């Protein structure tokens, strides 16, 4: 399995528009973060978790030629805003994009991209097949996917485990039984917005505590805001085995 970190930024990305803080003005590429997403390649299958506004740019940067399915964590625009760009894969692969999410997220997608689901479609609109998932394991092309149910403040979201890799972003609350679904994962990616407490995201210490409980071989932090600080400085403060993820990072599992 190969995991590629497509983006590690928050809903505004880093740098943030019109912000003059030292992180946003940093020339270090590690401080430049597109909206959070990840690509998983296993065998001949390619899955992407979330397609935010930077989806097109991320696909071009990584020279992606096919995506077999999209897994959507929740319906905020920084995770769904790029769905229109699946058209490119429709044309190349000559088939619809398979999109998996909980029912409330699929309803939001149908509302936001209503033109893609009309009976008489305008030529060239994205072709999307929607699949409802619940908090039960399911399969895509023979690959077992385990949903991880959590809360983003009051919004239910899904993380996902595929084999020895687990991914959870935009979470602020998770029940012990859901957390334990990630136990035994060799690599875990989890959100850590900033050092200060936040109402809808884990902060740095909360994410560290979770990773130290789960004890993966390596833990990575994602969905990082400009308020976290400079990548090079924060990295020096982290415990062994835990790192800040960065855009373009590749993990072999």
Image (spheres, rainbow, N blue to C red):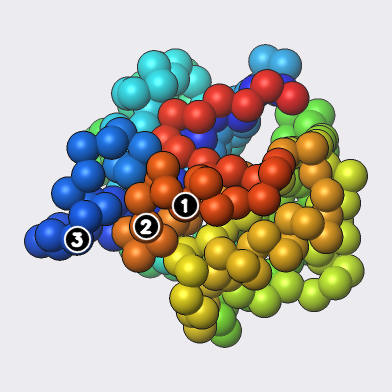
Say which mark, if any, is on residue 183: none
Q: In which quarter of the view is residue 44 placed?
A: top right
Q: Position of residue 25 (x, y in %)?
A: 17, 49
Q: Callout 2: few (<14), some (14-19), or many (20+) C-alpha neighbours within 10 Å? A: some
Q: Position of residue 53 (x, y in %)?
A: 31, 48
Q: Which residue is mark 3?
A: 21
Q: Quadrant of the C terminus?
A: top right
Q: Residue at x 42, y 36 (%)?
A: 247
Q: Indicate which disc, 2 or 3, sits on the residue closer to the N terminus.
A: 3
Q: Is residue 17 left or right of residue 191?
A: left
Q: Residue at x 45, y 66 (%)?
A: 194
Q: Which residue is mark 2?
A: 229
Q: Position of residue 37 (x, y in %)?
A: 48, 44
Q: Callout 3: few (<14), some (14-19), or many (20+) C-alpha neighbours within 10 Å? A: few
Asked whether 55 or 16 is in front, the reply is 16
Q: Position of residue 115 (x, y in %)?
A: 30, 54
Q: Callout 1: few (<14), some (14-19), or many (20+) C-alpha neighbours within 10 Å? A: some
- Dot 1 falls on a residue whose secondary structure is helix
Question: Do labels 2 and 3 touch, CB within 8 Å?
Answer: no
- Dot 2 falls on a residue whose secondary structure is loop
Q: Is residue 156 left or right of residue 1?
A: left
Q: Residue at x 36, y 32 (%)?
A: 58
Is 86 rendered above or below residue 18?
Answer: above
Q: Indicate which disc, 1 or 2, sits on the residue closer to the N terminus.
A: 2
Disc 1 from disc 2: Cα separation: 6 Å
Q: Is residue 220 left or right of residue 232?
A: right
Asked whether 158 or 198 is in front, the reply is 198
Q: Is residue 53 left or right of residue 69?
A: left
Say which mark, if any, is on residue 234: 1
Question: Do labels 1 and 2 touch, CB within 8 Å?
Answer: yes
Disc 3 from disc 1: Cα separation: 16 Å
Asked whether 199 or 30 is in front, the reply is 30
């Amino acid at each position: 399995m190969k995991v590629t970190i497509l983006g590690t930024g928050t809903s505004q990305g880093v740098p943030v528009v019109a912000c003059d803080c030292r992180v946003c003005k940093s020339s270090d590429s590690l401080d430049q973060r597109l909206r959070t997403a990840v690509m998983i390649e296993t065998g001949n299958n390619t899955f992407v978790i979330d397609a935010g506004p930077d989806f097109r740019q991320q696909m071009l940067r990584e020279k992606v030629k096919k995506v077999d399915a999209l897994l959507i964590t929740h319906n905020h625009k920084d995770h769904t805003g790029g769905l229109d760009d699946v058209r490119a894969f429709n044309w190349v692969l000559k088939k619809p994009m398979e999109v998996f999410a909980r029912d409330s997220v699929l309803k939001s997608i149908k509302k936001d991209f209503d033109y893609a689901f009309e009976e008489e479609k305008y030529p060239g609109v994205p072709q999307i097949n929607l699949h409802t998932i619940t908090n039960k394991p399911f399969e895509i092309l023979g690959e077992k996917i385990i949903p991880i149910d959590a809360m983003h403040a009051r919004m239910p979201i899904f993380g996902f485990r595929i084999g020895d890799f687990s991914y959870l972003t935009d979470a602020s609350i998770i029940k012990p039984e859901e957390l334990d679904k990630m136990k035994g994962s060799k690599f875990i990616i989890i959100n850590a917005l900033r050092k200060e407490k936040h109402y809808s995201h884990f902060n740095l210490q909360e994410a560290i505590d979770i990773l130290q409980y789960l004890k993966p071989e390596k833990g990575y932090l994602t969905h990082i805001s400009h308020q976290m600080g400079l990548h090079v400085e924060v990295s020096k403060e982290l415990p062994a085995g835990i790192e800040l993820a960065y855009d373009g990072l590749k993990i072999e599992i």
